[in-house]
Amino acid sequence: MRYVRAFGAFWYDFLVGDRWELFLGPIGALLLVRLLVVARVPSDVTGFVLFALVAGVAAASVGSALREAGRPRG
Amino acid sequence: MSSIAIVTVVSSFLASAVEFVEAVTIVLAVGVTRQWRSTLIGTLAAVTALAVLVVVFGTAIAVLVPIALLRLIVGGFLLIYGLQWLTKSVLRAGGAKARHDEAEIFAREVAALREEPPVPATGMDWISFTVAFKGVLLEGLEVAFIVVTFGASANLLGPAALGAAVAAVVVLLVAALVHRPLARVPENGLKFVVGAMLTTFGTFWAGEGIGISWPESDAAILVLLFAYVALALAGVWAVRTWVAPQGDRAAASAEPR
């Protein structure tokens, strides 16, 4: 049981780490864009939307890390 | 060699070099503090385990899983993993997070190892073996993960493994020559580049996996890479402007009144 827990903890740390939004954000982005693909939205649009969502997740995560570190807004 | 194969070799080389530098720091700390023989046996055992993992999983995944599903899963993993590296690099470059310092990690490892029981006079030192094995296996797993995902998604296991192998040889040669932690390797800069590359490939393959037909096919990879690097650099600038006022206030409060 100890090994199973350690194995789970390793993969959790490997994939999720200390920033859960970087795990769930891309999954949410892919699900959303998949809906657009199914709705036959053109590929150049869906490609751009995926890129924009991923970039948005990254920006939100950096902003969240800064807030947690207690940095002033300037 | 096609352009995507070259990018795969470069990505695999850079990502592997970063992880091998971290593994070498642990191996050096154990070898210098305790016993080189057991340390090197532990290292060799870990490298063998990793090679088996790459060959078995790399081949099995590529053969058994349909390519569209494979690209979605692997692309998703690369995307998650690449974003973690990229955002940490942006925070480090912007001054909001401590930079990775191999010399400091080496000193910490050496201090911890000195508190362990003494090295046995004869035979194997299992502490050296275990610490080296664990360190190399854990750092190397990230390399194995990258090699397997690149290899499986683009059917380029050979070029991906080649990039990792060249990185291992280069890092080991340099470590053997200088015989101290590779603190001068621009590890943070490398992580920035690798993070952008992994995020790019992750977006591209996961996008294909959910049914996107990228305009201009593989050329879209370069466009995505350029866009992510540009955004990450803008992120570094934004973090710096966010962090700077705190430094100014600290300096102002430290001035004599």
Image (tube, coloured by chain):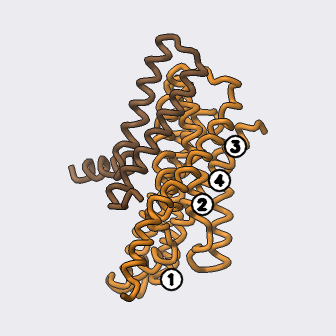
Q: Is mark 2 on a helix, strand or loop?
A: helix
In the image, B212 versus B12, the foreground residue is B212
**Residues beneath discs 3 and 1 located on the same chain:** yes
Work out whether mark 1 precedes mark 2 in sequence or the reverse, and give the earlier one. 1
Q: Which of marks 2 and 4 is in front?
A: 2
**Residues beneath discs 3 and 2 located on the same chain:** yes
Which residue is drawn at the image coordinates 56% and 36% (left, top)? B59
Residue bearing the label numbered 2: B189
Q: Colour of chain B?
A: orange
Please, what is the three-letter code of the amino acid marked with disc 1? Val
In the image, B42 versus B159, the foreground residue is B159
Q: Colour of chain A?
A: brown
Residue bearing the label numbered 4: B13
Q: What element carries label 4?
A: helix
Please, what is the three-letter code of the amino acid marked with disc 3? Val
Residue B50: image x %, image y %? 51, 53
Q: What subunit carries mark 2?
A: B
